Image: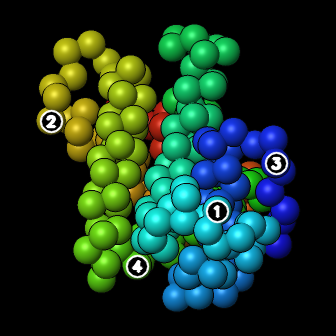
Amino acid sequence: MSVMRTTESPDERRRHIAEAVWRIVRRDGINAVSTRTVAAEAGMVLGSLRHYFPRQSDAVAFAMRLVMERATGRIRGIVAVAGPEGASGPELLEQFLPLDEERREEMEVWLVFAGAALADDALAPLKRDSDATMLAIIRRIVSAAAPADTPLDRVERVADRMRALTDGLAAHLVGRYPALTPASARAILADEYRGMWA
């Protein structure tokens, strides 16, 4: 449990609550998420939680969106520092992989949410939106490296392949597949990126 600072802005409080949802999901599973458990985990009273998220489903939906926002925020940060031409494709794609503890936590939570979205009509559209956002980002990364005059359908196929690769690497890293380490995942991603137009 963490205690909410009284000086937090409304946006910070929402993120604080979303991170409480993440901790519950990682520790106890998505079925353990309720307004009471989230309020307790966030260190706040139930009425305060309901001010930000009237229903448990609102907090879960926000927590799910925050996972994707963190990944896209890291990508925007890299591009802002390096510039669109200076950021490497593999470095940008790595932001979708759980290569450190922060991203591992996000990916573990994301996989739980993605599984829940298969049977939850409220989460399913969020999953579809996040999938579309991720694929659009990967298409931009792939397109920026495409040889001149590459047909759009080929760009889309390569982007789909890179999406499948990042998904697979992420799942294996979260599952702690013994043969795959963060370093080997980076190497696989870089190798595939270099050869994607071959």
* 109 or 43, nearer to the observer: 43
Tell me, for residue 48, which label it has, or none. 1
Tell me, for residue 70, which label it has, or none. none
Tell me, for residue 116, which label it has, or none. 4
Comes first in the chain, label 1 or label 3: 3
Comes first in the chain, label 2 or label 4: 4
* 196 or 38, nearer to the observer: 38
Comes first in the chain, label 2 or label 3: 3
Decide: is 17 above or below 132.
below
Disc 1 to disc 2, how far (Cα)?
50 Å
How many C-alpha atoms fall within 10 Å of the one at disc 3: few (<14), some, or many (≥20)?
few
Residue 63 seen in this snapshot: no
Percent position (x, y) of residue 182? 72, 56
Determine the residue positioned at 68% across, 44% down: 12
Horizontal relation, residue 45 to residue 128: left or right: right
Q: Which residue is mark 2?
A: 153
Query: Tag 3: residue type?
Result: Thr
| Quadrant hosting residue 26 | bottom right
Horizontal relation, residue 62 to residue 4: left or right: left
Q: Which residue is mark 3?
A: 6
Horizontal relation, residue 28 to residue 43: left or right: left
Asked which secondary structure carries label 3, the reply is loop
Percent position (x, y) of residue 125? 27, 61
Disc 1 to disc 3, how far (Cα)?
12 Å
Which is more foreground, mark 1 or mark 4? 1
Query: Tag 4: residue type?
Result: Ala
Disc 2 to disc 4, how far (Cα)?
32 Å
